[in-house]
Amino acid sequence: MKRLCGDKFNKEAEQEARRLTENPLLYSGSSTTYFKESCDPEALCYWVVIQELLWNYCSYFVPLSNVWLKTSIHSHVQNQSWYIPVKKLSRNTLNEVNTGKMERPLEANRMENNISSCLLMERKTHVKINRKEIMVAKMRKSCSCTPQKLKNFLMDFFPVLQWLPKYRCKDYIWGDVMSGLVIGIILVPQAIAYSLLAGLKPIYSLYTSFFANIIYFLMGTSRHVSVGIFSLISLMVGQVVDRELLLAGFDLNDDAPPASGDGSLQNDNLSNTTAFNLTIAGINAECGKECYAIGIATALTFMAGVYQVLMGMFHLGFVSMYLSESVLDGFATGASLTILTAQVKYLIGIKIPRSQGHGMLVITWINIFRNISQANLCDVITSAICIVVLVAAKELGDRYKHKLKFPLPTELVVIVVATLVSHYGKLNEMYASSVSGAIPTGFIPPKVPEFNLMLRVALDALPLAIVSFVFTVSLSEMFAKKYAYTIRANQEMFAVGFCNIIPSFFHSFATSAALAKTLVKTSTGCQTQISGVISAMVVLLVLLFLAPLFYSLQKCVLACIIIVSLRGALRKFRDVPARYHVNKVDTLVWVVTMSASALISTEIGLLVGIVFSMLCIILRTQRPRTALLGQIQDTSFYEDDSEYENLSTVPKVKIFRFEAPLYYANRNYFLKSLYRLTDLDPNLEAARRKKYEKKEKQHLKKGSHRTANGLGIGETTLQLVPKQIDFQALVVDCSSISFLDTTGVSTLKEILKDYKNLNISVLLACCNPSVIDSLKRGGYFGKDFGCMQEMLFYSIHNAVLFAKDQKLPADCSV
């Protein structure tokens, strides 16, 4: 049961009101009582008196819509007809009418002044759910197999079976083909470039782009996202690959001159067999550096896909909720700094090994400055030209994107021109410029990822799986909302998981949705995932026929493409002042996550960001805002006295607000804030009182009229309590307390007992049902809840009115 004043409709009071309002001056409508339009001011005066009497009688149980007043008020400008709610008429209404100044009264001009008209609101009786029976029924239903259920399962697992038969070819085909071709053209240079981040040959990036688009076409629920290689995922894969190569004893310097050959797959396999012909973690003795690297990458990808499928099976998509926008943005920006740092050596053409371990960014920059004198002038000039062209084209594309039907394929043009210049200018032979080398055509026979390698990278696969899933689902939900359709997050997890599991058998590495390519996809008219199939066909064309043509492509050109693609992430630094203005804590989370991702490592940076954001939430609940409330004049509302002007204090009543759940971590802060704001610690006050009373009794027993302090008994009484307690009731505003634990209930019981010893009553207001249940279970209201109506109130104002009506001594001094 809960005290509720002024919010229920009392039918008996309404009937009595209607009986008393039967007057020749009035007539009754269907649901509202009005004045006749011809009533004069004297009649209006008479009605105001009746209204005041009726209002005190009904005590808020007559609804607003049941009694209205209609009169004509003549002003010096024009005649106006006013409909005035009787409930809102104040005692000054007569003066306002006679003077012709009728202003709209405040919404809460009249407040409750009679606590005796309160009602009791009954809680619903909830039927106890037998969870065991529900679980057994769900298991029985899940284990059953019928043709219809099998069909539904296939339709859900492969969403393409649902939307492909309904495909509107005339409406969609042109947009899908155009966007597919554009994305395919963009994918080829990006795939070759991102292979540098992953520490793998370009052919494996092309495999990844091909298989990811085909599988997501079959299993994805988003119509617009572009799934494939992603810079952050490639970086995370590359860090694991480099670490394992270093542990296996391989040289991380990937700038060795490429082996000559005709570009065939066999020659490439021979060139990959290095002097390290030993058995490593179960790998064949003839497996060299490249073979071992792709083995690590496929094992990592397979494990990430398994994690994602398991998370989908157990509906663990809620894990993504712990990655806030600030954490994701900070992680992306920090990883972008790491990517940029890793590409600088290709920009200037110096030969330094890929740094590994924590602090890779700092170590790499130290090595760069130490070897800056070895910079290749040809690579520096090529990089400068490519960056200028790419940035200028991007800026022009952004400025005139509304006029362009599709984005300019700048990356492809730069790669084609740079390859031709490098080939015919013989930049590799004459200036020792590092080039991509032979890219084989065709497909390598599939191979099962090594189980022994899976065990080595199982822990590294977990953050990779979470980041891949979060980016994919976030982009899917964003574009689904924009284009008014729905996605299934759980199915997205399955789709991304199998985009990793299946391609891992075909020498591919981890994938994710990419924002830049998705934006291009939507801007070029994409309607469905048919565009993904078109993109896969473009990549397949390169794989089968065109790959060897990129032999002379300089690595510095690929590095330029990667760095320019980071513009969006690096521009986040410009948003820091605006972010700080909106929320300082979120800005701090962004800075910490970005710094940890860049200065330590990407995986640890992500973990640091998650933990730090959770700590911020805990600290905000551990030390929340607290305030004493004052009353807004002529209303029944109360607000923070330190934040608003012209609030009136309630005599003999203190109103305390605590803006957080009350649990074990903030119990002490709750008590300290309460004692500080009310300027009274009941424990200290009670202890002092007992101490001096004991001394006084001792002196009285000795028959002395003077105390130990040399004062008389009356003077001793003044010494006992040097100050007056200026309140007789404490109202705790529980509207911001979302839950109570055992410690929270004990804390409220403690202050109830302590203040009661000082003749101060503690009243709770605005408690939600879960808090009330916790208080009941904790015995706050006693065994039979008999005192609940005098301790719990629906609103602060009801508690204040009740406190004013309490018959406590006028002198509240102890």
Image (cartoon, rainbow, N blue to C red):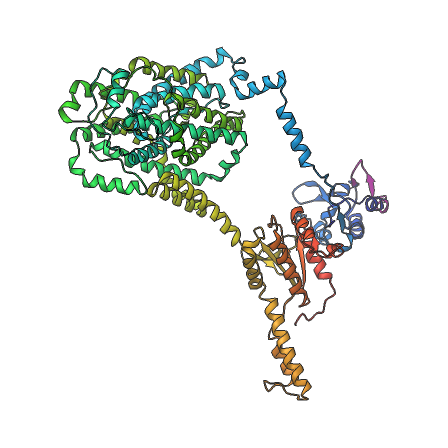
Residue drawn at point x = 34 percent, y = 13 percent: 541
Residue 414 visible in the displayed image? yes
Residue 404 visible in the displayed image? no
> Could you tell me residue 280's position as x and y percent?
32, 30
Q: Nearer the viewer, residue 556 or 63?
A: 556
Residue 30 on the magenta segment: yes
The segment highlighted magenta reads 19-33
> Could you tell me residue 147's position as x and y percent?
62, 16
Given the current orientation, which residue lies at the most extreme top position? 170
Q: Nearer the viewer, residue 482 or 556?
A: 556
Q: Is 745 drawn above or below residue 302 in the view shown?
A: below
> Could you tell me residue 763's position as x and y percent?
67, 58
Q: Is 53 drawn above or below residue 682 in the view shown?
A: above
Q: Nearer the viewer, residue 112 or 292?
A: 292
Chief secondary structure of the magenta portion: loop
- 540 sits left or right of 658 in the view: left
Q: Nearer the viewer, residue 630 or 377?
A: 377
Considering the image in quadrants, where does the C terminus appear? bottom right
User: In terms of image quadrants, where is residue 365?
Assistant: top left
Q: Is 42 drawn above or below residue 459 in the view shown?
A: below
Residue 104 on the magenta segment: no
> Could you tell me residue 530's position as x and y percent?
45, 16
User: In terms of image quadrants, where is residue 656?
Assistant: bottom right
Q: Is 749 drawn above or below residue 108 in the view shown?
A: below
User: In terms of image quadrants, where is residue 402?
Assistant: top left
Residue drawn at point x = 61 percent, y = 67 percent: 682
Residue drawn at point x = 58 percent, y = 85 percent: 709
